[in-house]
Amino acid sequence: MSTTVATTAKPRLKTSAMIASFADPGQKTAPAPFGHALVKAAQENDKIVGLTADLGKYTDMHIFAQAYPERFFQMGMAEQLLFGAAAGMAQTGLIPFASTYSVFAARRAYDFLCLDAAEPNLNVNIVGGLPGLTTGYGPSHQATEDMAIFRGMPNLTIVDPCDSVDIEQAVPQLAASEGPTYLRLLRGNVPTVLDEYGYTFELGKAKVLRDGADVVLVSSGLMTMRALQAAKDLAVHNVDVAVVHTPTIKPFDAETVLTEINTDRLIVTLENHTVIGGLFETVAAEVVKAGLGKRIVPIALPDEFLHAGALPTLHERYGLSLDRIINTVLSELEV
């Protein structure tokens, strides 16, 4: 006699490989927040111009191009030319926002950005799409080390936004700031998360989104969304979690972050970036300089070239998924 056990098939995780969304099903989102924010900023400042390297649709720059065709410049597949031209425009007093994929900005055009924009400290705003692990197209398009590359560039401000709120509020502040900036763009239908926490973006400032007695999660980018989700789910395990959002990676708000981690709580950093040269090492360096002697647990991408595939599968594989975050925190608390 044989017995058949009925099982419920788990739905297969699927996304488009190139333009993949990290929004959860049914989650509140905003369409193309960067493009709409740039149009709004341009309405108030006629010096703002937009440029792209054949990627207007895929960096939400097409919204600006439709609104201000006379202030939009399509540079073709030539990233060095893109940023060299943007620097020239900035030299004349214009405020350029130049978009491409993060890998092409960081790897292909670094020298032009460094010498044409950063050295003369011009207001050139670099808008990088597909930062970290936000595409399934593999190492050619996964900008897993972009912050590590750019952190060493003098004068450059680096912003890693969590959601549509961050992006919408960051754009006018980047336009008004001195010197070059790099925005790790989240494009398409971007989750809206921070509106529930009384949050406002301030360039150069970290914000404590929630308090907690047991764990401090220090996060940036889309990982702040995951940190907030993990904090709610960990409450079921009687774990009280604080979340500190650090949207500006450089200059870094060490004062706010160190105040929060100088306690007996477990400290975990979360970032959509390689463990080398990003948020974890930024926080660790500030801890060492302050002489705090704290242990920090990193949740980050490994120091390796990643596989291609469906985005949810890759996030699970490389430790960025909600389940992996929760398991990491619980395992650390058991030590």
Image (cartoon, rainbow, N blue to C red):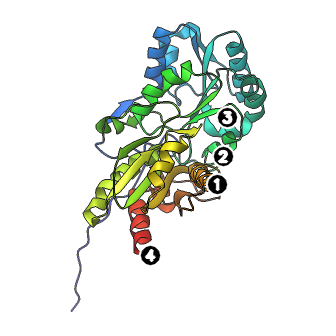
Q: Quadrant of residue 141?
A: top right
Residue 112: x, y in percent? 76, 29
Instruction: Name the residue beneath numbered marker 2.
Output: 148
Residue 67: x, y in percent? 47, 12
Q: From the viewer's side, name the closer residue of 22 and 43.
A: 43
User: Is there CB contact under 8 Å for labels 1 and 4?
Assistant: no
Q: From the viewer's side, name the closer residue of 282 and 16.
A: 282
Task: Report the mark closest to the observer, 3 or 1.
Answer: 1
Q: Residue at x 71, y 19 (%)?
A: 87
- Give the residue type at disc 4: Val
- Give the residue type at disc 1: Ile
Instruction: Name the residue beneath numbered marker 1.
Output: 276
Identity of the residue furthest to the front in this view: 291
Q: Residue at x 49, y 39 (%)?
A: 247
User: Is there CB contact under 8 Å for labels 1 and 2?
Assistant: yes
Instruction: Name the residue beneath numbered marker 3.
Output: 105
First in sequence: mark 1 vs mark 4: 1
Asked if residue 269 shows in the view, the reply is yes
Q: Residue at x 61, y 35 (%)?
A: 101
User: Is there CB contact under 8 Å for labels 4 and 2?
Assistant: no
| Mark identifier at residue 335 | 4
User: Is there CB contact under 8 Å for labels 3 and 1?
Assistant: no
Task: Report the mark closest to the observer, 3 or 4.
Answer: 4
